[in-house]
Amino acid sequence: MKVLTDVMEQVIKRNPNETEFHQAVSEVLESLEPVAEKHPEWLKAGLFSRIVEPERQVCFRVTWVDDNGNVQVNRGFRVQFNSAIGPYKGGLRFHPSVNIGIIKFLGFEQIFKNSLTGLPIGGGKGGSDFDPKGKSDGEIMRFCQNFMFELAKHIGADTDVPAGDIGVGGREIGYLFGMYKKLRNEFTGVLTGKGLEWGGSLARTEATGYGVCYFMEEALNAKGKSFKGATVSVSGSGNVAIYATQKVHQLGGKVVAMSDSNGYIYDPEGIKLDTIKRLKEVERQRISKYVESHPSATYTEGCSNIWNVKCDIALPCATQNELDGEAAKTLIANGCYAVGEGANMPSTPDAVEQFIKNKVVFGPAKAANAGGVATSALEMSQNSMRYSWSFEEVDAKLKNIMVNIYKGASEAAKEYGQEDNLVVGANIAGFLKVASAMYAQGIL
Ligand code: NDP
């Protein structure tokens, strides 16, 4: 449709070199053609041009002093993309690859993901090109404090509530929250992923990984399959990967491969999660160390080779574009029948095309990994009530949300003539709610 093609052209022209952002917008706009045809009033209100432009984006200098007394300068970002259905909500990523294009792609995806949860949260994302790897605790703390010095001016419990993402876990959220509290002299739920003693929610740590499995179990069940007895590969070994692995094991599947950015391990007897948790969560070690204590396992250099491992179900849980068209073909040739995206946009457009064409049960990120942000929204609710729910209560709500996301995406896919295409279904279901809210609120 001409209007949508024009919007895409404008996005490319206005945001040169932001390839990941272009990729994310292009996928969503393609899915929205039938919606645009059905809603001429949204076209007239310029809704499609407005939704691809962040409401606000801030970019700031973060200066800190390393352990050797050297001054270091990093760049911080916060993109407040869309607040039509609630305060901006989305994680902070600390990784050397971070730039404005990456943050915008993540923020854009977040709008629809947050809408899919059914909870009142808008879309945002932030981060820095700071590399936490190899930094001391003191350096991490000084960086986080200086990052929050600036970020605090732009966020608030009813305005924008950041959380963790790659490189930002419980330790970093603690330092960030401490500085916000000191600067504002207020104890509010301004960040999620907090420690349990100071406003965090039970099951938040597990939520994204568990949520991917709840979503995929529902999608698999619809095709007469399940995790039970399945062989599974999980890329990454961070927060999402660890808890996805835990849930796969609880559901009766066997995870045989995991990775980090250097390489992957293969353990045909099933990966022992206790070892991974010790190496990654406590010792902050490389995954190659796993083979030292598990003779049944092998280590292979090169993280993308993990997709050569034969598996029934693949859960990419590391980072964007980690699974390309060739990897998708290899997975399919090896009998893989389901892929659930734990990471954000881990499959390239070529890979997605392969999955859809070959009728692989494919759970796209914005639906499959929405459990993290959903539970963050539950953390916000508990903070507002000054109350906390038990692990079981939060986990049950999370499961219910993931089942509903699956239903919403699959029903939308069917309604718009693309049965079983959860990419299209998730994009449409996520978009409809935000679009009606934007339309109701006038031209802004
Ligand atoms: P973590 O920092 O805890 O873990 C990231 C993992 O991915 C690590 O094992 C890391 O290896 C690996 N990794 C990072 N970059 C690369 C790369 N370029 N190539 C290969 N592997 C890489 O992050 P999370 O687990 O929190 O996040 C993982 C993904 O899930 C991200 O896409 C994130 O946006 C998404 N996500 C996270 C949510 C959450 O609640 N945490 C919610 C929704 C989505 P190494 O240690 O070597 O760097």
Image (spheres, grey):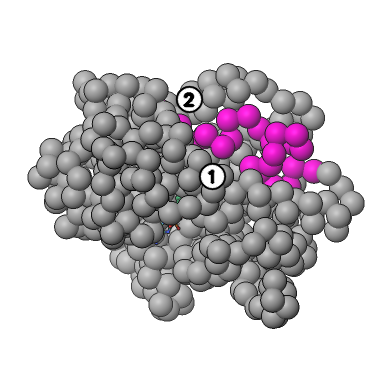
Residue 314 falls in image quadrant: top left
Asked whether, in this view, residue 302 is left or right of residue 12, the answer is: left
- Against 437, residue 286 (above or below) is below
| Label 2 CB-ligand 1 distance < 8 A | no
Crowd band around label 1 with a 10 angstrom C-alpha radius: few (<14), some (14–19), many (20+): some
- Against 414, residue 2 (above or below) is below
| Callout 1 amino acid | Glu
Magenta highlight range: 188-214
- Mark 2–mark 1 Cα distance, whole angstroms, equals 25 Å
Asked whether, in this view, residue 399 is left or right of residue 266, the answer is: right
Which residue lies at the image location 72% right of the left edge and 55% below the top edge? 176
Which residue lies at the image location 20% right of the left edge and 45% below the top edge? 309
Q: Residue furthest left?
A: 333
Q: Nearer the viewer, mark 2 or mark 1?
A: 1
Q: According to the image, label 2 marks what residue?
A: 399
Residue 327 falls in image quadrant: bottom left
Sequence-first disc among 2 and 1: 1
Which residue lies at the image location 69% right of the left edge and 80% below the top edge? 70
Front in this rendered view, residue 76 or 196: 196
Q: Check if residue 144 falls in the magenta segment.
A: no
Q: In x, y percent, where is residue 168? A: 59, 53
Q: According to the image, label 1 marks what residue?
A: 281
Task: Report whether residue 203 is seen.
Answer: yes
| Callout 2 amino acid | Lys
Crowd band around label 2 with a 10 angstrom C-alpha radius: few (<14), some (14–19), many (20+): some
- Circles 2 and 1 in contact, beta carbons < 8 Å: no
Q: Check if residue 198 falls in the magenta segment.
A: yes
